[in-house]
Amino acid sequence: MRLNVLDLFLDCITESNEKLVEFGAAGICNCCADPANAAVIVKNGGISLMISCLSSPVQNTVLSAIAALYYLCIPSTKRS
């Protein structure tokens, strides 16, 4: 059995519980510096999900989203 942590983090972002959204955004932020992870995140709609986090009332969620978007929108991942 394989645990798909990236999918778990992305799923957390769609929840109504702000704590889950915060943890999901932080998890994506921590993983997206790796090009292989970034490609999976982009492929699974992570950019739009992280953009949705920019309007969160939780400051840590917004900061994680900004940092993640920085890594996800660089030219090497835009091609994906």
Image (cartoon, rainbow, N blue to C red):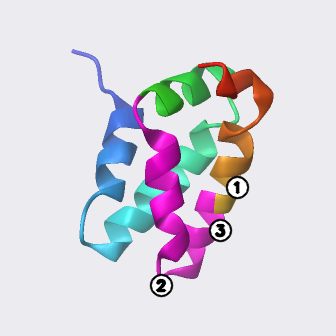
Q: CA distance from mark 1 to mark 3?
A: 6 Å
- Residue type for callout 1: Ala
Residue 59 is a magenta residue = yes
How many numbered dots are placed on residues in this image? 3
Residue depicted at 74% across the width and 48% down the height = 70
Q: Residue furthest right?
A: 75
Of 23 and 47, the residue lying toward us: 47
Q: Which residue bears the numbered disc 2?
A: 57
> Which quadrant holds residue 17?
bottom left
Q: Do labels 1 and 3 touch, CB within 8 Å?
A: yes
Measured as percent of width and height from the top left, residue 6 is found at 42, 35
Q: Which residue type does callout 2 highlight?
A: Pro
Residue 63: mark in rendering: 3
Q: Quadrant of residue 75?
A: top right
Q: Is residue 22 above or below residue 50?
A: below
Region in magenta:
44-65
Residue 74 higher or lower than 67, as above or below: above
Quadrant where the N terminus is found in the figure = top left
User: Residue placed at 47% from the left, 76% from the top?
Assistant: 56
